[in-house]
Structures are given as C-alpha cells and as structure tokens.
Amino acid sequence: MAAAATAFVLLDLQRYLSLDYFRAQQASLEAHYRAFPLRTAALYMALYIGVTALSLPGAAVLTLAGGALFGLGVGTLLISFASSIGATLAFLVSRALLRDWVQARAGDRLRTINEGIEREGAFYLFAIRLTPVFPFWLVNLAMGITPLRATTYYWVSQLGMLPGTVAYVYAGSQLGAFRVSAGLVLAFVILGVFPLVARRAVGALKARRVYAPWAARRPARFDYNLVAIGAGSGGLVSVYIGAATKARVAVIEEHRMGGDCLNTGCVPSKALIRSAKLLSHIARAREMGIAEASARVDFADVMERVARVVKTIEPHDSAERYTGLGVDVLAGRARITSPWTIEVATPTGTRTITTRSIVIAAGAKPFIPPIPGLKEAGYLTSDTIWSLREQPARLVVLGGGPIGSELSQAFARLGSQVTQVEMGPRIMAREDADVSEMVRARFEQEGIRVLTGHRATQVVVEHGEKVLVADHQGTAVRIPFDAVLVAVGRVANTTGYGLEELGIGTTKQRTIETDAYLQTIYPNIFACGDVAGPFQFTHTAAHQAWYAAVNALFGTFRRFKADYRVIPWATFTDPEVARVGLNEQEAREQRVPVTVSTFHIGELDRAIADEEAHGLVKVLTKPGSDRILGVTIVGEHAGDLLAEYVLAMKHGLGLEKILGTIHTYPTLAEANKYAAGAWKRGTVTRGQWAFLSAFQAWRRGSGTLGAVLARVVGLVRDRRPAYADDAPPTG
C-alpha cells in the first residue's frame, strides 16, 4: 500500500486520472468497451476501488469519466459499488493503522464523539454522505477511528452516496460529448444545487424522525410564534426581539422578573461592592493626605441599600414594561408537554398554550457540594445571602471563583472576619497565575485568610460552635465560623419542566445539548443563557438570545451560528480583573504561539494621581503581527478599559490602530495605548536600532554614509529584540 501510494506521487500517475487524458483516450476506451464490455467494467472497478481504498486523488474524475464511458445506468451501478467497497477498505485501513494510536492519545476528547457514533452513527454518517461537507476520503479515515461497525459503514455509504453518484455520473454522461449542451448545463446545475437540497433533506428527515412520536399532537394553529421559559436576560431579550418583529410572544416566569442577575447576582453584588469600596477608601484616607477619617457600618442599612438598588432597576425588567412592548407575561411554572405545547401552572389554575417555537432560558442555581453536616449546620448561597440583616462576625466562603472572591472581599471590608477556602492550588484559577497572585496578595493585605489547597470534608457543631473541617495535604484544618457561604459554582436548571419526557439531552457540564444554532434535537426548541452554556454571564445570555430568537422566528429562511469569538468578562474584586480572548495559561494549554506585551499600570500618570498605581494590561498577539488574540487587564476600572480591546478584536483592528488613536490625558484609558506601545517596542530589532543610530549620526555630520550603508546588512541579519524589557517609555 505504501509503495503504491509512493509510486502514484513519484511517477506522477495522477496525470492518467485527468479529464485531458480521458479526452485523448476516449475513442480507444469506447472501442475497448464495445469489444470487451465485462473486462473493461472489471478493470474500471478495480482501478476505482484501488484509488478510493488508498485515499488517492482522482475519484471525482473517474466518476465523470465513468459516466461518459458507460452511460448513466451502467456507470451508476459500477461506481456505486466500487466507491462503497473502496471507501470501506479505506475505513478498515484507518481502523487497523490509526484507531488504537489515536484513541490512546485522545480518548478523553473523543469520548463524546464515540458515544454519539454508538448512539446514532448510521444517521450521522448518512447525513455526511448525503451532504459532502468534508472530502469523502477524509470521512473514510476519520470514521475508521470510531466504534462504527464496518458492515454499517458499507451499507450506509452505499445508500448515502447514491444520490451524489447519480448526479456526478449524469454530469459525466453529458460531459462525454465534450460540448456545451442543455443537458451539460443541467448536470452542473444539479451538482451545484445538490448539496443544498440534500442538506435540507437531511434536516427534514431528522426533524421527521424526532417529531414522529408527537405528530398527532401538533396543533393546526398556534397561540404564539415564540414562548420563552424564564424571564432573565436570555428570555427577555428573546421576547423583546420577537415583539419588535411583530411576532406574538410570551414569557413564563415562576419567580421574579429579571432573573438571577437583577435579583440575586450582578445588581445586588455590585451594589454591595460599591458600599464596601467606599469603606476601603475611607480606610486609606491618609494616602490622600487626609489626617483622619472614619465610618461606622450599619450592616442592615447597607443591605437595605442593596435592596433599594434592585427595586430601582426592577422597572427595566418589569411585567408592566414588557406588556407595554407587546409581550404576554405569564406568572407560573412552565412544563413543556410536547414540542409545541406548554402547561403553565398559576395560582389560579393550569392553562395550556401552543407555540411554533420555544426558547428555554431557565438559568442556573448555586451548586451545593455533598459535604457531610453542611445542610444541618445551615449555609448561605449567592441566592440567599441578600436576605441577611445581621452581619456574620466570622464568615467562611467556600470557593475561589469570581462569586466567592467578590463576596469575600466585600464582607471583609464591611467588617467580617473572612476565611476563603479553595480546593485548588490558587483562587481565580481561570486567570493567569500572576493575576491570581495579585488578587490574593490584596486579599491578605486586607485581612482575608486565603486557604488554597484545602478540601472541605465536613461541617460539625461542637459546644454550639460551627466548625468547617478541611483537608490540607493530609492534615485536618479546623475553621470555626458563624456563617458559611457556598460559592463553588452554578449548575444549569435542566429538570422539572419537561426536558426528560421530550428526550432533550444534557452535556457533561449539565447544560442543555444544543447545536451551533442553539437548537436542541427539536428544530423549533432552542436554549440560551446559563442553561445552554458554555458561559454564565448576563451579557452572553443576551448575546445568545439574539441568535435563538432570530433562528426560532426566521430559521426556515436563514439561520445564524452563535458567535463566541469575542466574549469579554470581568471579576469585580479590587483590583478588578477583566479579560477577553486567550490568556497565557490557555495559550499554553492549546499550544497557540503568542507574543506577550505587558504594560504595568503603576507607571501610568492618572493611576499614580489616584493612588491606584497597581495592575497591568497584558496583550497576547499573533507572533509577527499586531493581531490581538487576547487581553487581560488588572486594576481600577479594568472592566471599562477592556471595551476598547473588545471592539478591536470584534472588528479586526490591531494594536497599530490602538497605538495610532489619541487617548485623553490623563486617563486610565491611556494604559491601552501604552500596552500597544509595549508591543511596538518589542518589534524593534537591534539591527534597526544600529541602522537608525548610524543614520542620525550621519545627519548630524558626525558619521559617514559608508557607516550607514554598512548597517543596512544588520537590518536583515540582527533580528534580536532591541529591548530586554517590555516596558514602554514613560511621559
């Protein structure tokens, strides 16, 4: 096999598999076929099988030639069997040579694919064969490393490739005359349109299969064009878009309008952080030249302020506002009873509504780990902590992620003795190690006890005192507390409203399975926001909701894949941490080569004036280019500063554009320009520096033109960076 493939390349045998060669030999081949029909057919099939089995280029030309030589009927028969046999042989070759090797090295990443192939491999292969998204030779090799049975592979390939084979053979039969004719034009039209028609056919076939058990329950008419389950960011944006496009829409909410963000997440946490930050500024009064300043915290008043902020923002997400926009707001618990019907349980009874499309935006809830004694001792979550009116003197925070870190610092600044317990080696593990260290250092400076590498094992109550027991390198560490906040992550709400009965699956991350269009297995049911993943941010829920709503309302005519290329986020600790795209940690894990340019905000005039001279702007670019791959900002107002980079990445603007943009002085936003300057300094080589020095000396009259010309060679030869550090000039 290796010898045959090598000979094919070295001897340029591909020239025999071209239309030019066939045209030159057409008359003799046709004469041979008339004299020895069976022998010619057998030789043709053997050649076709060999080319396909060895994954050599030329199958498409052979198909066209077969149509010209044998005609539509005989050509289709020969090519259908030859291509299927050759494809199966290539499949078996891949299985024998590659499967064990690939599975041993990438088994974990392939597990989901393998499970999908075992579950519905025949249909998946049929869809690929019917709509050739990838070259068939690549499909043969790729499917060989999966657990799909060879017999299944053969018959599905035979069936799935048949329509395409007929189209190509017909084109070849018309091409045999080597003249432009109506039939030839029709053949090429069929070849061009076939993949689009086939894709639609596969979609219709898949939809028919999934809808089959519910066909008898499909309504003749619908109450709504779209119904959203959940009135958080995802659900509200979905129905807003629907109402704006004159669709009849409804949103169902069991609890409170606005979802987690308004009531228990973004809004209350930022209100609490603002009060806590004021206290931190008062504590730093001497840094500002103020001899004495103090404040007395009334915790209940602080929490009442938080509630007041929520109440002030409530009208933005209220039932009254959305009713005014043309949305039917239904207060109650939703349950999907078929792909088109939803039962809504309200205090006054249960009603059933019908809808063409459904958007599931059910959000997420705090994950509670199974720690013995935790439930009995009682715990707080990011959902329940806002009901506190008495400040806990000793607070344990379980979790070193964004929620745990934000609330740890806020409560510590308000006066609680806070211990943050994280099972991993560092807090804020998704950020770069140096970023995590900056936050940890500030926490410890402010009196927060940060215990990383500590795994909570149980909660006990001894002599009326609550104690968390954590394992640290085999040693039991005891942490007394008055209240414990569980902030170890959130899990999507995927139960209790009918997904199980409809057979809508969930991922390993416990989110709803959706495709690139946010579509579930039912073409009219979509999911967005926390319940869909992969991000749990309010702004990504709104972002996804646009795609879900537009695809639900207009997907019959055009669909849009959700775009996750530029997703920003921020953690509102002090210092703030904001990021978009890759960081160094992810670049290493994904083996993406990057150039790192860093500007330390401590050198920025405005930061110095504000006594906030700390933090950094770290930009990752493609080596040899100013294309931005990711940005991390640590410091005051990092979330606001990030917007410039989000815009640049979204619209393909590089660091040269940022460097060439005027930034107001003195502002924190200048840090973005200086970071671009750090990148620019990194592009200057020693050869360029030496050339410029000689050139300027010659211009002053203290150097010679010969010295300048001598340095020209250095421009090319000496490509070493001119600067050992990455700090830009100041001032």
Image (cartoon, grey):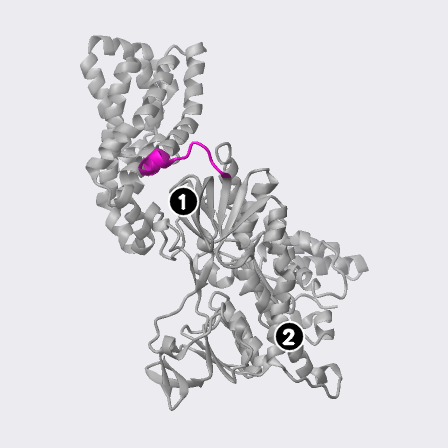
Amino acid, disc 2: Ser
Q: Residues within 10 Å of mark 1 (few under 14, many from 20)?
A: many
Q: In the image shown, does 485 or 327 lie closer to the viewer?
A: 327
Residue under circle 2?
275
Q: Which residues are magenta?
A: 206-224
Q: Is residue 303 left or right of residue 181?
A: right
Residue 537's place in the image compared with 176, above or below, is: below
Work out which quarter of the rendered image holds the C terminus and state it.
bottom right
Residue under the point 21% across and 44% down: 96
Name the residue at the bottom extreme. Answer: 463
Q: Residues within 10 Å of mark 2 (few under 14, many from 20)?
A: some
Residue 3 position in % (x across, y down): 25, 36
**Tag of residue 698:** none
Q: Earlier in the sequence, mark 2 or mark 1?
A: 2
Residue 533 visible in image = no
Amino acid, disc 1: Thr
Q: Is residue 590 left or right of residue 34?
A: right
Residue under circle 1?
520
Residue under the point 48% across and 33% down: 556
Q: Is residue 118 left or right of residue 592?
A: left
Mark 2 residue element: helix
Q: In the image shown, does 69 or 325 lie closer to the viewer?
A: 325
Residue 687's place in the image compared with 216, above or below, is: below
Residue 476 visible in image = yes
Residue 273 counted in the magenta span: no
Residue 218 counted in the magenta span: yes
What is the tally of numbered marks visible in this picture?
A: 2
Q: How far is the residue under mark 2 from the one under mark 1?
A: 43 Å
Q: Main secondary structure of the magenta part?
A: helix
